[in-house]
Image (spheres, rainbow, N blue to C red):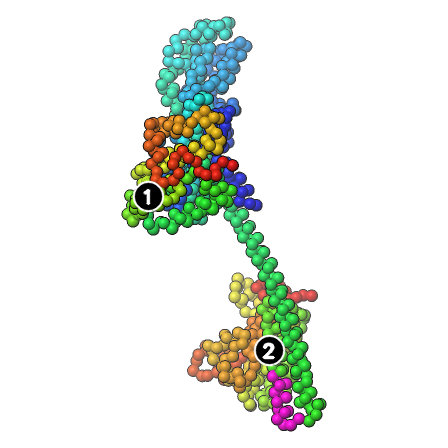
Amino acid sequence: MTAQKTQGNALDVVGDVPIRLDEVIDRDALSEMCRSMQALFGIGVRVYASDGALLANVASELDICGLVNESSQGRGACGATVSAAKSVDPGDDGDVVHPCFTGLAYRIVSLDYEGRRIGRIVLGPYAPAGLREPPESLARTVPKLDVLNSTARLAAVARVKPEALGRIARHLKTTIELIIFSSHKAYVTSKLHLYSVRESYRALEEKTQRLEQAHTKLKELDRLKSNFLGTVSHELRTPLTSIIGYSEMLAEGIAGPLSKEQSEFVTTIHGKGEQLLALIMGLLDLSKLDSGTMSLRQAPMQISPTLKEVISTVAPVALKKQVELVLDDDGAACELAADAERLRQVFVNLVDNAVKFTPKGGKVTVRARVADGGPSDDDDGGSVLLAPVRRVVQVSVTDTGIGIPSGERAKVFDAFYQVDSSSTREYGGTGLGLSIVKRIVEAHGGTVVISANEPSGTANEPSGTAHEPSGTVFTVTLPSAQARRTLPSRLPPADRT
Amino acid sequence: MQLNFAAREVAIKLVYYGPALSGKTTNLKALHQLVQEKSRGRLMTLETKDDRTLFFDMLPLVFKADSDHGSMNLRVKVFTVPGQVVHSSTRRLVLQGADGIVFVADSQLAETENNAESFLDLRANLKELGRSLSQVPLVIQFNKRDLPNIRTDAEIDELARRGKEPVSKACAVSGVGVLESFFGLLDRTWKHLDVEHDLRDKLGLKPEAFLAMAAASLGHAGQAAALSTAFIGGSPAGSTPTGGSP
């Protein structure tokens, strides 16, 4: 749709297109008004459009007309007079008197709009003020007419002075022209409203089209970015694998015995290589999660086996650090629709983190429970019905480590964030782990929150109370498979395949 | 212009353009007051909200002119556009088919930028309609001469002498300068159409005779020349804008 096309529909209202009387005036309403004129002055009113169409006809037959119409000659002559009144030229003044053979007359007034003749009003028949007896034309036209009777009937017709009739005619003309003006104005207004709406619609459509094009382009760019990331990470990993592999072989003495110092150097190379690999993998995961291109292989699963696997993975590190590692899953059984491998990654990250920040002799507890979901953020009620299907699995990882100041807690999920930059050296790590955890959990429709490990029994007290936290609790909440299937929510739907 | 030989009718469309609140509607109302009753139709004002024109105003002027080929009907429809920036598409619609344009500028110094913006808008809208300023007769009216903090007469005169368009001054609220802008544009428009459509031959009506009859019919007999030449700068009346004829 072009601007020209939408204009086409409204052009006639800003041009010079003649209006049609029958289009701007309501016939019934016009007839009603003419009837009231007739009731007021006793004179018949007819309104014609310029093409001769009769729009209003309010005239009752006068007695004299009835008498004339009894004869066939009279009827013919009467018809001829009426049709002449319909077409006679009202002249430049737009006001003319058309006589009838009976001595009566019609007053014809033009209806004008913007200088155009668009119709006429025909008033009559009426008896001119000077009419005393039937004119010769009556006897000539209808020879068999009862003269006495016709004279009496003619005398009964009310006399109207030309000036008075002129005033009546002008009043009627003004009234009808005003109606035409108002109605034309309403017509123009409605046309323009329509035009405005169409024009806005057209503008919106154009904008939508531009946005769609931009969207397509961005999607393509996004795809290219993902491809680029995939390629780059692959290219980075290939030489890194060699570095790690060969340094490992060197360290193992495959290429001959190493001095203590050489061995130390090679081990450092190997360790840093592993660290770099983890960083590259983390970046790749993060970018995939950010762009939504990470595909989760969601399948029915239980949380307990995954957690057991996690504990056994991290156990050697904990043992080495002399940190107690406890799993308390209380047989938590609730079906999840999730990617087991990704969830394992989440909990390895959290537990590994907890162990890392817990000093020797400390304790890390992994606790799993199934709970009814509480009211959601946009709770519309009905929780008594909805809570049972809103079941969630809550897994908390609690440590007795250095803790995180409350002001810093929200930031730990940001990529590359470290609570204390100086602790980077002490504890190591890239700062990517928790941001990946958060994104994976959210991709499963869950949440992860962080709180202080309050001494038992005071966990519900508001934060900021006197005692310092002695550790950190990460709580991961995952919706059950049933919750994700049945509840309309902002959560991404579970992959049911 | 719409020319109907059979009905011996000529319809001309004039448009009052300009920034918001520069007095376009006031010009039209004053014009309505200043012309003879029998030659004017009702002033149609559409959809005003807080006295602001939402769509447009329209004043039809109708009169007869005697030509060498007999009497003919002339219809001049005068439109205003909505000045507010948001109504651009309505302005373009109203501008469609305009035979001449009065640009109503606000004399206040603070409005200088709005005047310029509106003028560029006019140029852009004409371009969008496939026309250019050089093809449409245009007069510029500096309105609101009665207000303080306005561009001075000397400044306007100086600028006008250097510019292409004829410039007049007005105070539309009191009707001053309204007829001058109207007749000045009517004169230039008819002369332009005369050259484009050879009206003097086709209608048997010379431009001078047309203007004199228009002035007489609208109630200002004998003042045609005085009213149509109260301008500074621009091409002298009688010459036509360049590049007009296709």
Specify the quadrant of the image occupied by residue B44: top left
Tell me, yes or no, whether the two marked residues, 2 and 1, touch with CB atoms within 8 Å.
no
Give the residue at mark 1.
B157
Give the residue at x 43% y 19%. A91
Which residue does the image show at 36% across and 34% down from the upper left? B228
Q: Is residue B118 magenta?
A: no
Residue A313: % across, % down: 64, 83
Image point (43%, 8%), residue name: A134
The answer to whether residue A4 of the structure is visible from this angle is yes
Q: Which residue is mark 2?
A: A279
Up the image or down, A6 lies above or below A299; here it is above
Compared with residue A262, is residue A181 higher up or lower down, i.e. above or below?
A: above
Residue at mark 2: chain: A
Nearer to the camera, A276 or A84: A276
Residue A267 is a magenta residue: yes
- Residue A335 picture quarter: bottom right
Could you tell me how far apart the alpha carbons at marks 2 and 1 are, in whole angstroms?
75 Å
Count the labels in the image.
2
Amino acid type indicated by mark 1: Asp
x, y (%) of residue A385?
A: 58, 64
Residue B46 left/right relative to A361: left
Q: Chain of mark 1?
A: B
In the image, what residue occupies the spot 43% across and 11% down?
Answer: A103
> For numbered disc 1, what is the local secondary structure?
helix
Tell me: residue A412, above or below residue A494.
below
Magenta region, mostly helix, strand or loop? helix
Q: Say few, some or many: other residues with alpha carbon within 10 Å of mark 2 (under 14 / 14 to 19 / 20 or more).
A: some
Residue B186 visible in the picture: no
Residue segment shown in magenta:
A258-272
Nearer the observer, B48 or A168: B48
The answer to whether residue A286 is left or right of residue B89 is right
> Residue B23's spot in the image, x, y percent?
36, 42
